[in-house]
Structure formats: C-alpha cells, structure tokens
Amino acid sequence: MEGGGARNVSAAAAQTKESADDGSCKPLPPCCVKAQAAVAESEAKCHATVVSGWFTGTRSRSGKPSKVQYFNNPMWPGEAHSLKVEKILYQGKSPYQEVLVFESSTYGNVLVLDGIVQLTDKDECAYQEMVTHLALCSIPSPKNVLVVGGGDGGVLREIAKHDSVESIDICEIDQLVINVCKDFFPRLYVGYKDPRVKLHVGDAVEFLRNSPEGKYDAIIVDSSDPIGPAQELVEKPFFQTIARALKPGGVLSNLAESMWLHTHLIQDMLSICREVFKGGVHYAWASVPTYPSGVIGFLLCAKEGPPVDFLTPVNPIEKIEGATKDGREMRFYNSEIHKAAFILPTFVKRELEAYNSSTEKERPEKPTAKPVKMKVMRDSAITAS
Ligand code: SPD
C-alpha cells in the first residue's frame, strides 16, 4: 500500500517473542490514556508506540498440550486483537515494508504490512465498499477515478461496479503487495482484470503532480495508516495536490482512522481539508472488526463546483445496472448504511465541535475571507461551510 509506514517492531522481529509485552514499556502518552477515561484528548500527538508481533499459547487438546500460534494485531498500546494462525502463507520484505500473509482460523487469509493488519477475507468488504461507494454514489456519473495505494485490488473491484466509469488509474508504490495479493487474495485481485484499469507503480504524490489539472471525478486514498512515510498523506500539500487533480465538484474519499483512538488526527485532517475543499467536508465511519478499536473512519471532501450532497446518495448503488448482481453482490454497503455512516456518536460530535471552536479562536481574523465553520447538521453529520 502506498506509503506503508515502518513501525518500531516488525512482525518478523517480534516472532520470537513469547509475548508483545517485554516489561520495558515507557509510560503511556496522554492520548493513550483515553482508553481508560472519557476525556477529550486535546494534547494528543500521533506516535508510533504500537507493538505488533506474535505469541504462542499452550492449550490442551485431547488431553495433550499443544502449541497454538496467534498473530497479535495491535489495536493501541495495551490492547490487541488476536487471530489464531492456521498457516503462514508468505513472509517477505519489499523496499518499503514487511509483507506477511497468513491463513487465520476465523477471518480467512490476512494481509499484514509492517505488523499491522490491512485486510482479511472476512471483513475487507466493509472497508473497500464504504471507502469507494461513499464517494462514487455521491456524484451523478463518475467517469475518471484514481486510486492512491489500494494495491490489493479491492477498491478497483468496487469502482468497476459503476458502469458510468470510463477510466480507473491506480498508483501503488509497492509491487510486492500487488504480487502477493494476486496469489493469496483472488477475490480482491480480480479488480485488476477490468479493462478500464491502468496500473502505475510508483509514488502517488509524484503521480498526482504530473496529472492534468481537473482530470478526476473522484480520488480514493487507500493507504496504510499515516505513521512514518505515510504521514505525508495527511498533510496539507498532499490534499492540495489531490484538489488540483479533481474536477470542480469532484470528490475525495480518504481513510480517517478510528474515532475511539485518533480524534486528534481526525481533527487535524478535518481542519486541513476544510481549508482545501470548499465544496464540503464530512466524516463517516464503519465497523471493521480487525482494524484498531473495530471501526474505521472516512473523510469525504468535495472540491468547489457543482454541489455535492454526501449525505443522500444521488447515484444509489441499487439503481446501477449490474452493480449488485452476477457475482458483484455487496456484502456491506447499501444506500441506508451510506446515510447512517455520517451519523456520529455524541462524544465525537462534542470533541470535533470543541476543537473547531478552539481553533477558530486561535486563528487570526481575516476580514476579507468568509469564515469556515464546522457545523453539526440536524442529521448529526459534521460538515464544513
Ligand atoms: N489500520 C489499517 C488501515 C488500513 C487501510 N488500508 C487497507 C487496505 C485495504 N484495501
């Protein structure tokens, strides 16, 4: 995946450990204490203290003790989601990241990059369908679409369900991810078989800089978490490059982490995107059990131009010829869940609103500029106007 960030402990290095906890932990930074207290994490900073790895457990089977291996999928310092490993299918290293594929006992095949679960056969549908259709179903007739990252092919598979789409560019930095997904994730790799797909292996920032201005109706950023090198993908220059490549009224769908763990990051992304995308900025979320805290968020942004109403799909998937049948059935997304995805829990609305009012106060008044304000809509969506 584009920008796959290096973490402090690799899966391979940690494999020999009996447990991820070696007792040498530093005190948790303030934002991590959030798991224990329902307070806003105003001083939180992004950090890479997550420790991933393996551990084995001894279990009695038919009276005889036997070794059972688990993958310890880091959720946050102090918590992990363990997946029982049936078989390791691939372990390797590209110039960008460590790549691991294993067969789990309950989630099918699992793709892990630098020790972080990226997708599993069982729950990949939720992420790929939502990150794609929240954007493409919000504009009338998407034609040119770009995927940043997304080397597994899952987002391509979803875009291909839109018969209005004429061209699908994908810019993935890591050829190894593509190769491994061809071998072990055929249900995602199938996305590459659509004749509209054109693969570019390389750096997406460079690719975007060289793209004609206003080329794309939609850009979908399907990257790794923004830690390490992928940090660039949540900074203002990147969003400006995206906006430049979009048509007026074009849309961006970008992963935006967990509202339980990363409100500081979500606040920063919302704040930057509100400055860049004058057609509207919204936060949506979905349940993905193998992602940290079991949820993932999405930032939906529109470039100024023909108005985009993300909250009510103008291009409903149910009305797209062939999008939901003949082996293309959705497993997660539908128009109801599209609308529901923008409804936010009270604490999220409160934290995002509080952040907005504090940054509004800090920002010097610009008499000529129209103030940009985040509003909580009647239907609970956070939006910028
Ligand atoms: N916390 C993991 C987030 C991973 C997002 N990218 C997943 C790639 C699936 N196409």
Image (cartoon, rainbow, N blue to C red):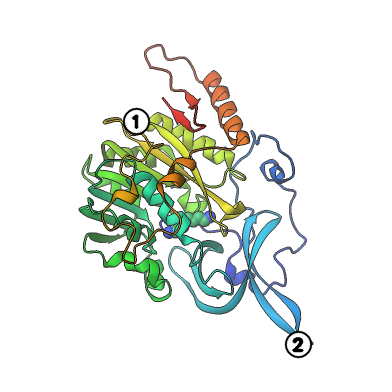
The residue depicted at 44 percent of the width and 41 percent of the height is 339
- Asked where in the image residue 301 lies, by quadrant, the reply is top left
Looking at the picture, how far across and down is residue 48, in whole percent? Answer: 60, 52
Helix, strand or loop at disc 1?
A: loop
Q: Residue at label 2?
A: 62
Identify residue type, mark 2: Ser
Quarter of the image with the N terminus is bottom left
Helix, strand or loop at disc 2?
A: loop
Identify residue type, mark 1: Gly
Looking at the picture, how far across and down is residue 87, in whole percent? Answer: 56, 80
Say whether residue 65 is left or right of residue 181. right
Residue 120 vs residue 114, the one in the foreground: 120
Residue 279 marker? 1
Residue 322 vs residue 364, the one in the foreground: 322
Say whether residue 177 is left or right of residue 191. right
Residue 69 marker? none
Residue 71 vs residue 50, the one in the foreground: 71
| Nearest-to-viewer mark from 2 and 1 | 2
- Asked where in the image residue 83 lies, by quadrant, the reply is bottom right
Please tell me whether residue 302 is drawn above or below residue 186 in the rendered image. Answer: above
